[in-house]
């Protein structure tokens, strides 16, 4: 049988991730696609810890730990340095969480994207500042509990649409992915590798301690994120050409995604109905952008 | 080759003859000519470097870090607010042991908005571990860029080349360009032992607890202490090759001086004229210019000041609540010695207020006439 996922492992056991950590699988798959000719920089995020304490490391590629807001610009510098030294065939990867991407790192990321620096930026999104103990970020969705959005004042603002922001920079490649679909993700990383310029990949990455979910349900949640249309899987070329890679014709109720996570436990039926409406509206908007005429609706009960 | 150039261009040409490979910079008055000229030099292929036109100073130094970490020689320049924005990354550059050279044009901090000179921007980076060279003329600016790369790449710490806003940055002076072949001999290509290398992958800057962090900091202190010797050696070697020798400090008419004025940067140039005039008037006054502020040349300063009758330190900076910063450093360097002279600590020229020969002569005369300083901090020329 031909394996669709490369056998090569560039991450070792002994890392410091929590049970059921999506971010660790994300890295594992990304490196399978990128291979040894890759240099990565990581700002403050779960991965600054997951990698392991000095003198240990769990990555078999060169890694530069950097300050919170500098993932993109350090990657730009690494690329400039490699270009100056004539080493042009090395992948430069910036690997950041949602806080380091949506919030504190957005300026440097926007700068790199506007210059179209030749880097791959991957944001693993667990929808809050998980490494510091579950504080809200601008990637935290409407309705979620975090330690800074307690249940009485759960987050009332919607998640920032980072993909739209990146597409507005008209970079050659922007894509979303889910850790539940490694083949799709690896295909996208491979595609990013072949494109010159700034590539932005956004991967949903379940976090059992932060989502208050079961560690053995991480993949299930990452699948439900897609099948409920909560986190659609698509790509945008040059900021214009939208392709949905996993078209969902009959979305499952978003409630199935929400009810498995303690962070949404406080939500009332009305709140859930609101989230459901928002999810479907966004998905229909996306379908339109991808040139698909039919709209979807959610049946009261899934099969 | 000799050419009349402004101080900012001396920084750019210094970077050019040092054959920098990556430049990342963001514009700020009064630094802009540094990056404008470097952009042109890169565009005209007179300088074979990658220029990353970043969106902030913070990203400028961070991009230099990435470049330096793969083994490329990296340069940036900034001023004032821009340097303050870089602060976090100056610490990171030091901890990551990356020998980046950065030019800083001394400009006072806002508010109120101002663009004129004082030293509070660079001196606020005192405790980062970044070397600091205060230059007195454009020749020294150009020469120091080359020397700073040599020193930094030996000890693996960054260097800051500092020049006064407008007084030096926008003043044109005759500058001798060292022969490129000799510069290449003096400053060989940057080839660090550890770098981001796909053939020998390492992780840099990983989580370190109290067990290891302490020793890593001790090693930085060891390196920056050792820099004193290396700065003197490289300054001497520079002198042998190019005819201009540099050290940690510079003494002027110090041999028999009873009263010593201590100054830095362009204030020291003005003070030299004041010393000449005072000597003509029969006063035994000398000048000690502090060129290198970090590492602080405590040993040299003790040798030069212990046993003198009086010292006046002239600071174009203020540490609010404790006074002139060079004065503090000099006092602390002298503290454990016997026979310490009384020290007058003068503040002058903050925010670019002109520092005239007369002002410095007044400072010298007040010091000569007084038995001891009446105040810990003396603000010169404050208007009612």
Image: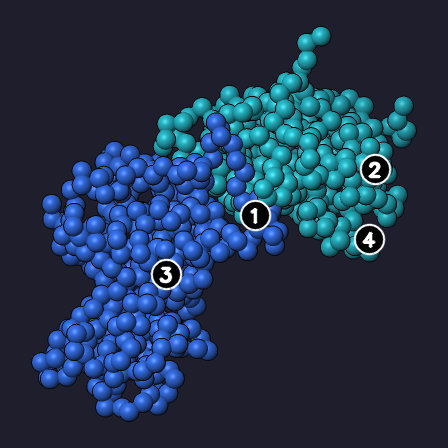
Chain colours: A cyan, B blue
Say yes or no: labels 4 and 1 on the same chain. yes
**Residue matched to label 1:** A68
Confirm or deny contact between disc 3 and disc 1 (CB under 8 A): no
Label 4: how many Cα within 10 Å (few below 14, some 14–19, many 20+): some
- Gap between marks 2 and 3, in whole Å? 54 Å
Label 4 secondary element:
helix
The residue lying at 54 percent from left, 45 percent from top is B205
Quadrant including the C terminus of chain B: bottom left
- Gap between marks 4 and 1, in whole Å? 28 Å
Label 2: how many Cα within 10 Å (few below 14, some 14–19, many 20+): some
Q: Is residue A170 visible?
A: no
The residue lying at 25 percent from left, 84 percent from top is B309
Label 1 secondary element:
loop
Say yes or no: labels 2 and 1 on the same chain. yes
Confirm or deny contact between disc 3 and disc 4 (CB under 8 A): no
Of all chains, the one bearing label 2 is A
Of residues B110 and A2, the one nearer the viewer is A2
Label 1: how many Cα within 10 Å (few below 14, some 14–19, many 20+): some
Toward the left, the furthest residue is B280
Of all chains, the one bearing label 1 is A
Q: Nearer the viewer, mark 2 or mark 4?
A: 2
Residue B379: where, in percent of width, then height? Answer: 34, 82
Of all chains, the one bearing label 4 is A
Left or right, A18 with respect to B341, comes to right
Of residues B179 and B36, the one nearer the viewer is B179
Left or right, B268 with respect to A90, comes to left
Of residues B203 and A248, the one nearer the viewer is B203
**Residue matched to label 2:** A214
The circle drawn on residue A151 is 4
């Amino acid at each position: 049988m031909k394996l669709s996922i490369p056998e090569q492992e560039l991450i070792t056991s002994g890392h410091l991730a929590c049970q059921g950590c999506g971010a660790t699988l994300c890295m594992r798959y990304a490196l399978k696609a990128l291979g040894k000719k890759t240099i990565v920089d990581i700002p403050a995020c779960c991965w600054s810890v997951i990698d392991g304490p000095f003198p240990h490391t769990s990555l078999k590629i060169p890694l530069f730990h950097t300050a919170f807001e500098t993932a993109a610009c350090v990657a730009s510098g690494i690329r400039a340095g490699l270009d100056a030294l004539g080493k042009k065939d090395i992948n430069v990867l910036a690997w950041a969480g949602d806080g380091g991407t949506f919030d504190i790192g957005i300026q440097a990321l926007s700068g790199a994207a506007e210059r179209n620096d030749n880097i791959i930026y991957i944001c693993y999104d667990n929808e809050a500042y998980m490494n510091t103990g579950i504080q809200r970020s601008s990637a935290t969705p409407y309705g979620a509990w975090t330690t800074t959005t307690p249940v009485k004042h759960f987050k009332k603002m919607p998640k920032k649409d980072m993909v739209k922001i990146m597409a507005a920079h008209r970079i050659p490649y922007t894509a979303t992915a889910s850790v539940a679909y490694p083949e799709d993700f690896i295909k996208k990383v491979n595609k990013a590798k072949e494109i010159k310029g700034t590539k932005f990949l956004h991967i949903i990455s379940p976090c059992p301690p932060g989502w208050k979910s079961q560690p053995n349900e991480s993949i299930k949640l990452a699948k439900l994120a897609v099948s409920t249309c909560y986190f659609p899987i698509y790509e945008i070329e040059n900021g214009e050409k939208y392709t949905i890679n996993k078209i969902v014709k009959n979305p499952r109720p978003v409630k199935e995604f929400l009810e498995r996570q303690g962070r949404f436990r406080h939500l009332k039926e009305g709140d859930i109905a609101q989230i459901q409406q928002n999810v479907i509206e966004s998905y229909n908007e996306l379908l339109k952008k991808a040139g698909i005429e039919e709209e979807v609706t959610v049946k009261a009960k899934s099969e | 080759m000799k050419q009349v150039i402004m101080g900012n261009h001396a920084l750019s040409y210094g970077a050019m003859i040092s054959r920098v490979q990556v430049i990342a910079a963001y514009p700020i008055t009064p630094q802009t000519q540094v990056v404008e000229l470097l952009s042109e030099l890169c565009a005209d292929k007179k300088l074979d470097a990658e220029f990353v036109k970043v969106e902030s100073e913070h990203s400028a130094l961070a991009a230099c870090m990435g470049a330096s970490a793969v083994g490329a020689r990296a340069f940036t320049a900034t001023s004032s607010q821009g340097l303050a924005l870089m602060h976090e990354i100056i610490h990171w550059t030091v901890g990551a042991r990356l020998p980046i050279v950065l030019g800083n044009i001394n400009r006072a901090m806002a508010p109120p908005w101002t663009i004129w000179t004082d030293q509070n921007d660079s001196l606020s980076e005192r405790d980062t571990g970044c070397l600091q060279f205060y230059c007195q003329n454009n020749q020294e600016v150009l020469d120091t860029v080359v020397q700073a790369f040599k020193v930094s790449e030996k000890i693996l710490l960054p260097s800051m080349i500092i020049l006064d806003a407008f007084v030096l940055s926008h003043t044109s002076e005759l500058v001798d360009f060292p022969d490129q072949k000799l510069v290449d001999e003096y400053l060989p290509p940057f080839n660090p032992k550890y770098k981001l290398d796909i053939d020998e992958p390492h992780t840099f800057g990983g989580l370190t607890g109290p067990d290891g962090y302490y020793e890593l900091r001790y090693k930085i202190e060891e390196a920056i202490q050792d820099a004193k010797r290396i700065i003197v050696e490289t300054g001497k070697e520079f002198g042998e090759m190019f005819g201009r020798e540099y050290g940690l400090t510079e003494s002027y008419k110090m041999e028999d001086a009873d009263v010593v004025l201590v100054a830095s940067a362009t204030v020291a140039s003005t003070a030299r004229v004041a010393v000449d005039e005072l000597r003509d008037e029969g006063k035994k006054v000398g000048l000690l210019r502090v060129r290198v502020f970090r590492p602080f040349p405590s040993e040299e300063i003790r040798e030069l000041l212990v046993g003198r009758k009086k010292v006046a330190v002239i600071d174009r900076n203020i540490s609010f609540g404790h006074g002139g910063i060079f004065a503090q450093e000099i006092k602390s360097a002298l503290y454990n010695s016997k026979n310490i002279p009384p020290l007058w600590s003068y503040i002058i020229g903050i925010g670019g207020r002109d520092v005239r020969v007369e002002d410095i002569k007044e400072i010298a005369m007040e010091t000569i006439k007084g038995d001891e300083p009446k105040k810990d901090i003396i603000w010169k020329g404050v208007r009612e």
